[in-house]
Amino acid sequence: MSYCLNPNCPNPQDQINSERCQSCGQLLLRDRYRVNNALAQGGFGATFLAQDASLPGEPSQCNQTARAPSQLHHKLWKWARKLFEREAKTLGKLGNHTQIPRLLDYFEDNEQFYLVQEYVSGLTLQQEIKRSGPFSEAGVKQFLSEITPVLQYIHSQQVIHRDIKPANLIRRSEDRKLVLIDFGAVKDQVTQTTTSQSEHTALTAFAVGTPGFAPPEQLAMRPVYASDIYAVGSNLHLPADWQIS
């Protein structure tokens, strides 16, 4: 089955595996990507699983994830475009880190924005916690040993993620490593000002983050690199029935 991403399609979900939508005539994005199904819906858009139809056999390892915002008011659309361009730029800048999905393509189609990234198969940390319960002491040490090098890397590139939470950490099935996803809230143009404690503060135009994980300075629109560390620590104090997504 395929999924049509035309926002005006009257029947996007009931499609055969073809190159054209039965309802509106559109199906392949950019005459290349066949979307199979929706994976998740979030504040910055939706995530879909797709295949690259331009490659012989459309092998499963070439599945991609695509992001698209919903129909928006013009001002919000311009804001979404800015976020899209920033996320694409940041993912390109971060390059080929083994615990960050690679950016494979990005484009605009029918006033919708799409990022095509490496598909990461596995459970999120949120799903793990609900299934197995809170971390043990050994689990905490293992978690920190896996996520700390990722933070060191993105911070060395002057990037603050600003939304590190269990739903944005996937345990990759093939090697059991944690992968950090969803860079839609990143701060990558760090304006550094010196405080009395000689800390570097990244000024930003709006507050982003998830309540319960974002620290006060981030919600006050003054995130620092340590804001990501605070968020990582918040991941260690979740009960098994934790519900925030």
Image: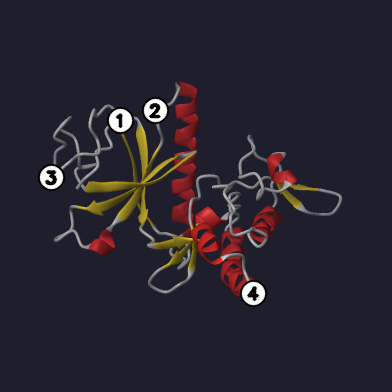
Disc 3 marks which residue?
18
Q: Residues within 10 Å of mark 2 (few under 14, many from 20)?
A: few
Residue 153 coordinates in the image, percent (x, y): 57, 64
Nearest the viewer among 33 and 172 is 172
Disc 1 marks which residue?
7
**Amino acid type indicated by mark 2:** Gln
Q: Is residue 14 above or below residue 77?
A: below
Residue 239 coordinates in the image, percent (x, y): 63, 58
Residue 69 coordinates in the image, percent (x, y): 41, 35
Q: Which mark is residue 71?
A: 2
Disc 4 marks which residue?
141
Q: Residues within 10 Å of mark 1 (few under 14, many from 20)?
A: some
Q: Residue at x 64, y 38 (%)?
A: 207
Name the front one of labels 4 and 2.
Answer: 4
Asked if the residue under mark 2 is in contact with the one under mark 4, i.e. CB atoms within 8 Å, the reply is no
Disc 4 element: helix
Q: Residue at x 55, y 62 (%)?
A: 129
**Amino acid type indicated by mark 3:** Ser
Left/right placement of residue 174 relative to residue 230 reads left
Asked if the residue under mark 2 is in contact with the one under mark 1, i.e. CB atoms within 8 Å, the reply is yes
Residue 75 coordinates in the image, percent (x, y): 49, 23
The mark nearer the N terminus, 4 or 2, is 2
Q: Residues within 10 Å of mark 3 (few under 14, many from 20)?
A: few
**Amino acid type indicated by mark 1:** Pro
Disc 1 element: loop
